[in-house]
Amino acid sequence: MLIDASMTHRVAIVGAGPSGFYAADGLLRTRPDLRIDLIDRLPTPFGLVRAGVAPDHQGTKAIVRQFERLLAQPDVRFAGNVEIGRDLSWEELQAGYDAVIVATGMVIDRKLGVPGEELPFVWGSWKFVAWLNGHPDFRQGPDLSAVKKVAVKTTAAKTTAAKKTTAAKTTAAKTTAAKKTAATKAPAKKAAAKKTAAKKAPAKKAPAKKTPAKKTVEARKAPAKASASASTSAAGSSSAATTKAAPKKTAAKKPAAAKNTTAEKTTSKKTTAKKAARKTVGSGS
């Protein structure tokens, strides 16, 4: 029996499910000197976590690791397969412990009050999930040999629908937040774009400012061209003057040549006259 007169500050918790373990944990945090016994009619602890949670929800079932650490303490014990009223009376329980906590849960499905729920082939979620988890009270599963159609609506389906709804709401909220953020950032982006455009504008107009430089270069080149053309013109003028001066020299030389020609003619005439005179003299003698 669990009752031991030598132990003091003993607490009995009827029900070794999540509520019983949470109660034991809370007591030990405030009174570490307590001796606690967890009593359950099932041969295994953890109650609803073990038998009432669908097998595919292992994340939810992981809480048993915390309960196992609690059971590993020397002042906490688990008494399974003990049913109050069958194996132990309430009077004996109250006499053997300083305090008794009842932490049992529902062992049947809650009725919804809908037509047809009393039919033999209608199973509640607790009964169906307990059968899936191997609960000793539901070893016999539903007889579906004469059933043509089966409709299953479990907590898992509701959870999946709730997750989808939550995901949709989250996506919508994120989209709305993104739109608001984009709307908030839009003026800043426009201002930054204007500043960038304003900074780039002088760089684009810079080539237009180079035109005076070209004009200056061309202006610098123009005097050179003018001087070159002036030099050419001067050279042409000097050559023309030289050419024009040449005829003057030729014209000046012509009278001398004419004088020489006249002198030659006069000399030839004199020579001819002399020859004629000689011939006359010769013929006279």
Image (cartoon, grey):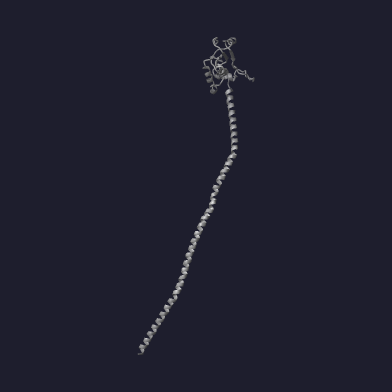
Residue located 45% across and 74% down the image: 252
Q: Position of residue 189 (x, y in %)?
A: 58, 40
Determine the residue positioned at 43% across, 76% down.
256
Q: Quadrant of the N terminus?
A: top right
Q: Residue at x 49, y 62 (%)?
A: 230
In the image shown, does 80 or 102 lie closer to the viewer? 102
In which image quadrant can residue 127 be found?
Answer: top right
What residue is drawn where x is 59% and y is 34%?
Answer: 177
Decide if residue 259 is in sight here.
yes
Q: Nearer the viewer, residue 103 or 222?
A: 222
| Residue at the bottom extreme of this rendering | 285
Residue 167 is drawn in which quadrant? top right
Q: Position of residue 226 (x, y in %)?
A: 50, 60
Q: In the image, residue 146 lies at what x, y percent?
A: 57, 19
Q: Quadrant of residue 59?
A: top right
> Which quadrant of the figure contains the C terminus?
bottom left
Whether residue 142 can be seen here: no
Left or right: 31 in relation to 274:
right
- State whether residue 71 is above or below residue 275: above
Q: Is residue 166 above or below residue 147?
A: below
Q: Position of residue 52 (x, y in %)?
A: 57, 19
Count of residue discs? 0
- In the depicted structure, whether residue 270 falls above or below residue 155: below
Judge from the rendering whether residue 114 lies leftward or rightward of residue 238; answer left or right. Answer: right
